[in-house]
Amino acid sequence: MDENLEVRIATPDDLDQIMNLALLMQQEIGIADANPHKILSEIYPSLHLDGGLVGVIGPKDRIEGGILLRFGTLFYSDEKVLEEKGLFIHPDCRSAKGGRARKLCEFAKQTSDSLGLPLLIGVLNDVRTKGKLRLYERQFGEPIGAFFLYNGRSGPELTRGD
């Protein structure tokens, strides 16, 4: 695998691979059942730079990770923010050299800087959480809050059925 990987902005040609990656992410860390149509409704416009964008890493024929960034507003304001909807590295690529997750974080920061928008990004799962938090703190600084999940499950726990 290439250690000099660069993040590129995904295009509509990447749709199938990004959808597969998104569904894999939901299976691993999701807190609710996947709705492929809803996932597509966030990803498809972003591939056309409509309301967001998708940064991907890896060759065109094998996307190894990606980040979905959407424009949004907070419930109390009309000012735009850049919201990270998901950042995921394919399990086969996590131990490979190149710092894929770090590069996607840097891409999110560069996008935030170039657009002049605040970036909302975080960790909302219980799979390898401490390592992800350390990475995010190195990339983004101290967190400003925390998420809690009450009366719910995430990832493989979601579909265990007990």
Image (cartoon, helix red, strand yellow):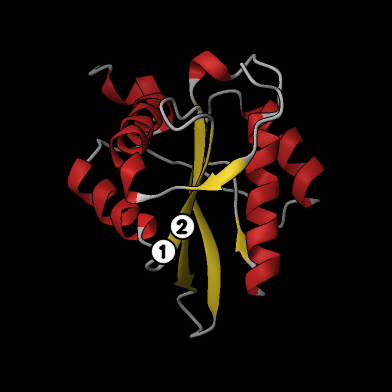
Q: Nearer the viewer, residue 134 or 55?
A: 55
Give the answer, above or below, for where 78 lies relative to 66. Answer: below
Q: Is residue 8 left or right of residue 136?
A: left
Residue positioned 67% across, 75% down in the render: 116
Q: Quadrant of the N terminus?
A: top right
Place of residue 64 in the rendered image (x, y in percent of width and height, measured from the top left): 50, 27
Q: Which residue is mark 1?
A: 49
Q: Is residue 6 left or right of residue 76?
A: right
Give the answer, above or below, for where 159 lies relative to 92. Answer: below
Place of residue 137 in the rendered image (x, y in percent of width and height, measured from the top left): 77, 43
Q: Residue furthest bottom?
A: 78
Badge 2 marks a residue whose secondary structure is strand
- For disc 1, the neighbor class at 10 Å (few under 14, some 14 to 19, many from 20) is some
Is residue 117 visible to us here?
Answer: no
Residue positioned 71% across, 67% down in the render: 113
Instruction: Please count the marks in the image.
Output: 2
The residues tagged by marks 2 and 1 sit, at their Cα atoms, a distance apart of 5 Å
Disc 1 marks a residue whose amino acid type is Leu
Q: Nearer the viewer, residue 64 or 25?
A: 64
Disc 2 marks a residue whose amino acid type is Leu
- For disc 2, the neighbor class at 10 Å (few under 14, some 14 to 19, many from 20) is many
Give the answer, above or below, for where 57 lies relative to 46. Answer: above
Q: Quadrant of the C terminus?
A: top left
Q: Is residue 161 left or right of residue 119?
A: left
Tell me whether circle 2 and circle 1 mark residues in contact (CB < 8 Å): yes
Q: Nearer the viewer, residue 41 or 4?
A: 4
Which labelled disc corresponds to residue 53?
A: 2
Place of residue 49 in the rendered image (x, y in percent of width and height, measured from the top left): 41, 64
